[in-house]
Image (spheres, rainbow, N blue to C red):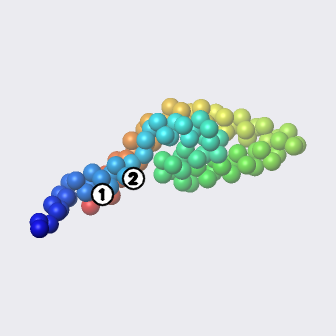
């Protein structure tokens, strides 16, 4: 009985990359449906700015009762629209950082 072939280091690194890499298409789907809360940024490894976006959105939503919240919602809308242009670069940056971690 023969032992199974051991995968090469390159193959293992490729499998790790495929398992942990981020898709631009998935990021756009998250951006479209949950982007106001910054979840697309969290998906792409931008945790701090994602939580800031979520906090501004939540606070602005709560303050719409006194009308001042609409200013924050306008700011979040502009940020959300700008992120539509930035998502491909953020996904590429995340995947490059992932390659650097795996290559060590």
Say which mark, if any, is on residue 50: none
Residue 97, visible in the rendered structure: no
- For the view shown, which residue lies furthest in the front direction? 1
Number of marks present in the image shown: 2
In the picture of the structure, the residue carrying the numbered disc 1 is 102
**31 relative to 89 in the view: left or right:** right
Q: Please tell me which residue is depicted at 54% across the width and 54% down the height of the picture.
A: 47
Q: Please tell me which residue is depicted at 64% across the width and 33% down the height of the picture.
A: 78
Placement of the N terminus among the 4 image quadrants: bottom left
Dot 2 falls on a residue whose secondary structure is helix
Q: Are marks 1 and 2 in contact (CB under 8 Å)?
A: no
Pinpoint residue 63: horizontal percent, then vertical percent.
82, 46
Query: Which sits in the foreground, 49 or 44?
Result: 44
Pinpoint residue 29: horizontal percent, then vertical percent.
54, 37
In the picture of the structure, the residue carrying the numbered disc 2 is 20
| Crowdedness near tag 1: few (<14), some (14–19) or many (≥20) residues, C-alpha within 10 Å | few
Placement of the C terminus among the 4 image quadrants: bottom left
Whole-number angstrom distance, CA of label 1 to CA of label 2? 10 Å
Dot 1 falls on a residue whose secondary structure is helix
Q: Please tell me which residue is depicted at 83% across the width and 41% down the height of the picture.
A: 64
């Amino acid at each position: 009985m023969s032992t199974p072939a051991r995968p090469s280091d390159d193959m293992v690194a490729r499998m790790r990359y495929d398992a942990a890499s981020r898709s631009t298409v998935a990021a756009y789907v998250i951006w479209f449906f949950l982007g106001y809360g910054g979840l697309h940024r969290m998906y792409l490894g931008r945790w701090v700015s994602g939580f800031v976006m979520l906090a501004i959105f939540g606070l602005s939503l709560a303050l719409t009762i006194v009308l001042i919240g609409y200013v924050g919602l306008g700011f979040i809308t502009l940020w959300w629209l700008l992120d539509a242009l930035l998502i491909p670069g953020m996904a590429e940056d995340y995947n490059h950082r992932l390659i650097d971690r795996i290559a060590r």
